[in-house]
Image (cartoon, grey):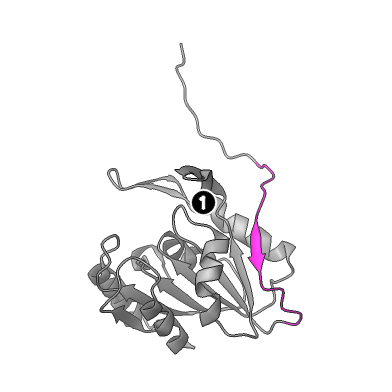
Amino acid sequence: MITQTKRLTVPAPMTCDTFCRGVEKPTQLFILLHGYMQSGKHIARQLEDALPSDAEVLAINGPFPIPRKSEEGLKLGYSWYFYNPKTDELVIDMKTSIEFIKGAIAALGFESLPKTLVGYSQGGYLAPFVARELSHVSRLIALNAEVLDDELEGQLGFRVDSIHGAKDEIVDPKKSRERHARLKARGVQGEFVELPESGHQITEEMMSALRGLF
């Protein structure tokens, strides 16, 4: 009879698929973090045109692949962590993804570049926790995601902007605005931009707002 269960943390090699512009002499780095069951390539294609042309772009597939059925057969989406909303529990927390992203940046030689993180949905929740673990981060932009102010103690050291669709049916824009206001009350610089015609998607309205931040 099985009488014990125990979760262990063990070191193991992981494959990391990355998508970059390949800028020869980049002046800054934009790190793009995709949403749940999406991919690095997907968010890179969505956002690239809104980003400064002199910047290198790094988009990474999350470490946890999720197969899904499609007309062409099985396709892979990816996740950064696993959250159970019924129990309000992180079944798989963010630590693996944070170290995963840090390792990719180091392997590519991007550690010393000035950095901006742009995270959409699940990637937006993850982004500030990654940003705290990196050097030379000047800015975080959350798209359709709450920035969890109550879990981000102390000085952040970077600007936080949020862009949120007013019609978002997945992440409550009102709660997102309230969290951003609490960050500003702590002295964090940044804007909250609410988009009247957008829901929980990256729309042209959102792309225009993102360009406006630069």
Q: Element type at marker 1?
A: strand
As for residue 73 lying within the magenta part, the answer is no
Q: In the figure, residue 120 lies in which quadrant?
A: bottom left
Please name the residue shown 30% across and 73% down the image.
Answer: 198
| Residue type, mark 1 in image | Tyr
Residue at the spot of label 1: 78
Image coordinates of residue 152 in percent, x first then y, are: 41, 66
**Observer-nearest residue: 146 or 71?**
71
Please name the residue shown 46% across and 15% down the image.
Answer: 2
**Observer-nearest residue: 203 or 106?**
203
Image side of residue 126 versus residue 146, left or right:
right
- Residue 194, compared with residue 75, is above or below; it is below
- Residue 126, compared with residue 112, is above or below; it is above
Image side of residue 182 versus residue 125, left or right:
left
What's the magenta bit mostly, secondary-structure-wise?
A: loop
Magenta residues, start to end: 11-25
**Observer-nearest residue: 202 or 59?**
202
Q: Residue furthest front?
A: 71
Please name the residue shown 48% across and 56% down the image.
Answer: 38
Crowd class of label 1 (few under 14; some 14 to 19; many from 20; radius 10 Å):
many
